Image (cartoon, grey):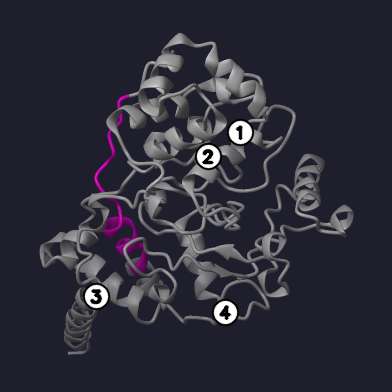
Amino acid sequence: MQNNRFYVTVFLWTVVTFAVTCVAYAGHLEPFKAAPVPKNNPQTPEKIELGKKLFFDRRLSGDGTMSCASCHIPELAYTDGQDISLSYPTTKNWRNAQTLMNVAFFKNLFHDGRVKTLEDQALFPMMSAFEMNQNLDFLEEEIRQVPEYQEAFKQVFGGEPTRERIAMAIAAFERTLISVNAPYDRFVKGDNSALTEDARKGYVIFTGKGKCAVCHAGVTFSDDKFYALNIPENPVLLNDPRVTATMRFVAKVYHYNDYRNLKEDPGRYLITKDKRDWKAFRTPTLREVARTGPYMHNGVLATLDDVIDFFNRGGGKGNRFLKPLGLNEEEKKLLKTFLVEALTGEELKITYPEVP
């Protein structure tokens, strides 16, 4: 009798949350048909193809060993599958590589939201001393010596390669990286068979007791805001002098006065200098989340089970945003089923370009 009541409750909650979701998503049931495009950088097939070639071109790194695709691998939903992203030889990165899937829909980019456009985003890793370590003045001259690129830039932009045009082309390609036809999308449009019974139960927990939808809302499953959840530092990296050098270098660049004594990632604070943003990071998208581990800004949580346990405990000690959820083992399992089954879109097939 108790089991029957449970299933009735689940069914009713599913109906209610489905109805609420339909209202919230009215007019947005197929959100990823086209990404927003800035007026000063319209999409064209030729520009997208040029951007794809540049995305996979190792010339964009200082020593010619790394491309954008080194850390954003298509088969891994444009992440690199590591806790801390790849770094330039002899250096060490300090943050996890975020997925580029659906990146065109975000208003804040990078974990700390330091830039607002994909055009600006494309240049940061190239210049970074611990990522691609490329001098942009040199890059312009290097690309200009490639006849195929010279012709392509003339055709697409009406002029020669520049850093701004390189970034615009890469951004155009990144706007095509869109997750489509996930089971959740079909479910929201009325296909109840798109989700298994366990995934539907997990959706009830996601929108209810789990409180996930408070921050992971909208078509991207992210509110694009920043929260200090007191995520623990990655213990593997705490005593690595290369990480310390990277962390303090970035803090110095952003004019943090006490950078020489820094022992943890300040997060968005470096950008805003607002104490409320100390160790705050942008809410990540949950689309393709089954493919994009390890998780959090420093990859400290290896699996989705770890992530669910972290939130179930109420986040990191002393944070002011989260409280313990009280999910039992069955509820955690159902929540994971929803995340894995419902939010994974069709595999985005890509034809690797021939880099000139």
User: Earlier along the polypeptide chain: callout 3 or callout 1?
Assistant: 3
Q: Which residues are magenta?
A: 335-351
Residue pointed to by mark 3 = 21
Image coordinates for residue 72, horizontal then vertical, percent: 47, 37
Q: Is residue 306 left or right of residue 195?
A: right
Percent x, y of residue 354: 38, 16
Residue bearing mark 2: 122
Q: Secondary structure at mark 1?
A: helix
The Cα–Cα distance between marks 3 and 1, rounded to whole angstroms, is 40 Å
Give the secondary structure at mark 4: loop
Decide which of 136, 329 is in the foreground and name it: 136
Residue to which mark 4 is pinned: 321
Residue appearing at x 87%, y 59% in the figure: 258
Q: Residues within 10 Å of mark 4 (few under 14, many from 20)?
A: few
Element marked by disc 2: helix
**Gap in angstroms between the C-alphas marked 2 and 3:** 34 Å
Q: CA separation, marks 4 and 2?
A: 32 Å
What amino acid is found at the position of numbered circle 1 in the picture? Met
Q: Is tag 4's residue or tag 2's residue first in the polypeptide sequence? A: 2
Q: Is residue 104 above or below residue 90?
A: below
**What is the three-letter code of the residue carrying label 4?**
Phe
Label 2 CA crowd tier, 10 Å (few <14, some 14–19, many 20+): many
Judge whether residue 92 can be spotted in this image: yes
Which image quadrant is residue 100 in?
A: top left
Query: Mark 3 to mark 4: distance in Å?
Result: 24 Å
Real-space Cα separation, disc 2 to disc 1, in angstroms: 7 Å
Distance of label 4 from label 1 (alpha carbons): 35 Å
Residue at image coords 23%, 51% = 33
**Of the residues tagged 3 and 4, which is closer to the observer?**
3
